[in-house]
């Protein structure tokens, strides 16, 4: 044997003591062999690489050899040793009858030269390779058995094996699928495509994938009707079973040729994928149809380009998806855009944080609008920011109103200040007159009518100032305060929601802490937490 190969265990089941002793002595003298003489009663335990038997040993232990071979899928070579005085080896083998069928090779004794060693080494290698192949098949069987997908083994379109997942998927008893046509497990409308996939796998090695459904206890035809080989009471039972559990399971079928005329069919359950796709489609529709602009920017891209823009954002900008996607939204800014909120937004994004700013943007038709932008980072499983989610709202009216309020406030304060200065001037004059009247050197020629006139001016100026103050108050009530949302009793809302959830949940300990005073949330915060409230 080679230096890295294990020694070959040679079992001697030779009834002729002289031949047995000669073989043992010869193998003891050769490197790479470990001869062992089997017990007379039970010589076989499968712990050998090659078995040497003479005719008497084979007749006595042929059944034992067959039994030990049945316990292992590995190849256990048996060599018939025929002494020279026993006659022709082939005639000796033929005389053994059925017992001779266990023989894999013949060896004339004594063998000349190194022929014995070569043949024994060759048989030992074949046995080890067979054992390795059997171990590989066992691993493959375990893999197929515990694979999360359904696996069927088919020969000429007929199921010869189905793993437990396939049996569970179809609601079948163990081994209950063997012998059925695989095409009968799918609706008639898909049978041609599935049959073609199996045939393609047999011809080219692979067929499919084909999306279809696997019928459970009852198949459905293309029109949704029941299609079953059984009739009468059996068919009624099948229909009743179908009402209690899903009649079919959507799958993706792929057929692979595994040799020896067999095709392995892998059926991947599509229910979770379909549900996930449906949820994603729902989320996409919700985002597309939201009344607030929504964008997603790729943070892994150096220019952080847009990869998604919903319909409302397209309406706000007057641009199509082709004009928006693949570009950084900074191109919407104008020369008049305030640099401070832009810089604040940039710092937040670089730090992977949220930000809320108002930016002056330009539409496709050249008109400007004020964009209330909220951005939030989106992270992957490792916590790395990969995208940024943006919410945009047109707040041009609010900004314009705030600007007008600022101007109005400045005008009001200017006018009131002027009126009050008049009041103060006339008040000083009245005080001077009154001081003169009360003094010892009072001028008896004081113009009382003039004093009264001054007092009238004071009253008028004060009334004007009060009127302006009332006008400002009414304007704020009508324009500013009316635009604010009414207070919402958050405690009542949360308690009602918790009560509804707990009514349908199993008993458990739960609690909530709510504020005792009503509270309201700005529209921008509501949009971030619940797009439907926008």
Image: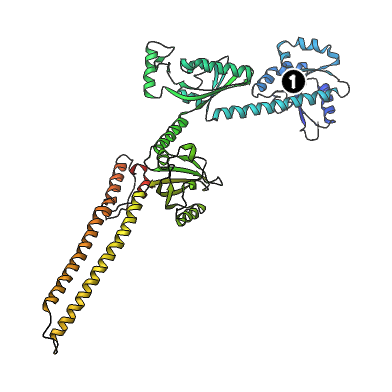
Residue under the image location 83 percent in, 21 percent down: 19
Foreground of the two, 107 or 127: 127
In the rendered image, the vertical position of residue 458 relative to residue 437, given as above or below: above
Residue 111 in picture, x, y percent from top left? 86, 20
Residue 78 in picture, x, y percent from top left? 74, 20
For numbered disc 1, what is the local secondary structure?
strand
In the rendered image, the vertical position of residue 57 relative to residue 517, given as above or below: above
Q: In this view, does 430 lie to the left or right of 330?
A: left
Residue, far right: 113
Q: Quick one: quadrant of the N terminus?
A: top right
Residue 115 in picture, x, y percent from top left? 85, 22
Q: In this view, does 329 lie to the left or right of 122?
A: left
Residue under the image location 19 percent in, 68 percent down: 462
| Quarter assignment of residue 367 | top left
Foreground of the two, 49 or 42: 49
- Pointer 1 residue: 78
Residue under the image location 51 percent in, 20 percent down: 175
């Amino acid at each position: 044997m080679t230096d890295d190969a294990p020694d070959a265990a040679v079992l001697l089941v030779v009834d002729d003591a002289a031949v047995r002793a000669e073989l043992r002595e010869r193998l003891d003298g050769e490197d790479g062999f470990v001869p062992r003489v089997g017990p007379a009663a039970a010589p076989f335990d499968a712990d050998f690489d090659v078995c040497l038997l003479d005719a008497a040993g084979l007749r006595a232990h042929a059944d034992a050899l067959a039994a030990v071979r049945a316990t292992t899928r590995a190849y256990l070579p048996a060599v018939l040793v025929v002494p020279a005085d026993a006659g022709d080896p082939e005639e000796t083998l033929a005389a053994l009858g059925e017992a001779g069928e266990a023989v894999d090779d013949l060896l004339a004794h004594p063998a000349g030269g190194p022929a014995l060693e070569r043949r024994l080494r060759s048989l030992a290698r074949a046995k080890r390779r067979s054992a390795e192949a059997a171990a590989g098949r066992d691993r493959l069987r375990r893999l197929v058995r515990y694979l999360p997908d359904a696996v069927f083994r088919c020969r000429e379109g007929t199921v010869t094996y189905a793993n437990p997942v396939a049996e569970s998927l179809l609601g079948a008893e163990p081994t209950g699928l063997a012998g059925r046509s695989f095409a009968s497990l799918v609706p008639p409308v898909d049978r041609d495509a599935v049959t073609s996939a199996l045939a393609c796998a047999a011809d080219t090695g692979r067929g499919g994938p084909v999306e279809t459904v696997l019928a459970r206890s009852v198949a459905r035809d293309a029109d949704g009707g029941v299609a079953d080989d059984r009739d009468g009471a059996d068919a009624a039972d099948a229909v009743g079973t179908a009402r209690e559990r899903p009649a079919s399971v959507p799958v993706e079928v792929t057929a692979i040729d595994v040799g020896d005329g067999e095709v392995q069919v892998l059926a991947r359950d599509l229910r979770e994928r379909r549900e996930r796709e449906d949820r994603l489609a729902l989320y996409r529709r919700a985002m597309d149809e939201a009344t607030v602009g929504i964008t997603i920017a790729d943070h892994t891209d150096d220019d952080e380009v847009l990869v998604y823009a919903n319909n409302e954002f397209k309406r706000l900008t007057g641009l199509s998806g082709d004009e928006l996607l693949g570009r950084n939204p900074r191109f919407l800014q104008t020369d008049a855009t305030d640099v401070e909120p832009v810089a604040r937004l940039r710092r937040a994004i670089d730090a992977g944080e949220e930000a809320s700013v108002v930016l002056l943007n330009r539409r496709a038709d050249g008109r400007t609008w004020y964009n209330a932008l909220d951005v939030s980072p989106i992270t992957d499983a490792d916590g790395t920011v990969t995208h940024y989610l943006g919410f945009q709202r047109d707040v041009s009216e609010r900004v314009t109103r705030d600007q007008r309020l600022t101007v109005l406030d400045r005008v009001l304060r200017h006018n009131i200040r002027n009126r009050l200065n008049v009041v103060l001037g006339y008040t000083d004059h009245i005080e001077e007159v009154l001081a003169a009247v009360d003094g010892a050197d009072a001028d008896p020629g004081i113009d009382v009518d003039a004093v009264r006139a001054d007092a009238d001016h004071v009253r008028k100026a004060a009334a004007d100032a009060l009127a302006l103050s009332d006008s400002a108050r009414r304007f704020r009530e009508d324009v500013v305060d009316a635009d604010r949302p009414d207070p919402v009793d958050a405690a009542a809302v949360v308690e009602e929601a918790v009560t509804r959830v707990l009514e349908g949940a199993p008993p458990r300990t739960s609690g909530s802490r709510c504020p005792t005073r009503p509270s309201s949330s700005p529209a921008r915060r509501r949009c971030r937490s619940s797009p439907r409230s926008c």
